[in-house]
Amino acid sequence: MVDGLAFWNANGPGPGGTGIQDVMVSSSEDGVTYTPIAGAPTTFTRVMSPTSPAEMFSFTEITAFYIRLDVLSNYGDPGNLVALAEVAFSGIAAPIVENVINPVSASTTLTAEFGTDLLNTLNGQGLDAFPSLSANHEPTNPPNSWVSSDTSGTIDFDLGGSYLVDGLSFWNQNAGGPGTDGDSGINDIMMYASDDGITYTLIPGSPTTIAQVTTGISAPEMFTFMELVASYIRIEVLNNHGGPFAGFAEIAFSGTPFLSVSENAFAASISLYPNPAGDVITINNASNTELKDINVYDINGRLVQQLHIESNTNRDQTLNVSELTSGIYMVHIIGSQSNTVKRLIKK
């Protein structure tokens, strides 16, 4: 999250007028597509002395991985040389945003053991952050994993809607559970996807083996595969790691909601600014759909703020978010015909 630039031009008496003069500053998140930064400097001052301070600039905060200086001219060096001494940028690291899909329910053909429940694998118990694709898992008392007396069978996960799914985070049975050193953890699997919960298709590139976990605290094993549309995911358990039971601790999928054509058009027409936000945000509606409600949820899915719109005569809606703490929020924007969710970062 970059908000400024410090620039030390070529010191005098370096070779001629080699210092950078006119410039365009752009930013990019992928290193391919660059966008000019509004309010960034367009000219750097010539430095005539051998010792010089930085020339400092600030601009509206942006999110970037890359900054480009497009040099347009120097200060007249006859050999067309261009030089600078040093450059630095001001800002803070942007929070990591994970596109987590937490299933809403699960069913299985395997027989549960020790009174465990598949809900244990969906509710984040034992994770040091939730929802998450990368948090560490630690066993708790009572146990927070799911254990079966069978070592093969199917487990179906209902995603609660249609998603573009592109990966899996899997926390296998921790060491200390039934069996020795996590040998009751799930081993060989096959993964399938379904739109209706009836017809399942094998997922190309999905994992076929889950590693054994030999520690009490463990990170997830993370997998990616080619993006596909699914409302249900099936894991067919083929065997375990040699123990008397089969089980795992937690599961989550990665991806984003799958939108219809009309929903995609509505989503593209809605924007939030500024984002990252300070005290007030504007919801810009460039669609022909009237807005009805704006609901703000925190990262744990709790409703923290809402706005009911009685009359939509003004398509731009403002929302005071000054009382929200710094962090990531989801803004659910509900229109008369479509709805969409936008991510908001509160400074």
Image (cartoon, helix red, strand yellow):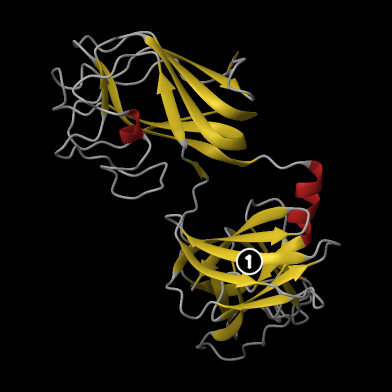
From this view, report whether residue 49 is shown above or below residue 29. Answer: below
Task: Tell me which corner region of the image, top left, top right, bottom left or bottom right, holds residue 240.
Answer: top left
As drawn, the residue found furthest toward the right would be 288
Residue at the image point whose x is 16% and y is 25% from the top: 177
Residue at the spot 74% in from the left edge and 66% down from the top edge: 291
The residue drawn where x is 45% and y is 57% is 299
| Image location of residue 83, percent across then percent down | 64, 72
Q: Residues within 10 Å of mark 1 (few under 14, many from 20)?
A: many
Q: Position of residue 136 (x, y in %)?
A: 29, 42
Q: Quadrant of residue 270?
A: bottom right
Q: Where residue 211 appears, x then y in whole percent?
A: 32, 21
Left-right relation of 298 to 17? left
* Kind of residue at disc 1: Ile
Residue 261, given in percent of the width and then of the height, sits at 81, 43
Picture quadrant where residue 278 is located: bottom right
Whether residue 279 is situated above or below residue 153 in the rendered picture: below
Q: Can the viewer see residue 196 in this picture?
A: yes
Q: Is residue 313 above or below residue 95?
A: below
Residue 227 visible in the snapshot: no
Q: Which residue is mark 1?
A: 294
205 left or right, relative to 125: right
The residue depicted at 57 percent of the width and 82 percent of the height is 11
Looking at the image, which is closer to me, 261 or 134? 261
The residue nearer to you, when weighing 330 against 64, is 330
Q: Quick one: 277 or 1, which is closer to the camera?
A: 277
Q: Secondary structure at mark 1?
A: strand
How many numbered discs?
Answer: 1
121 vs 217, left or right, is right
Q: Residue furthest front?
A: 310
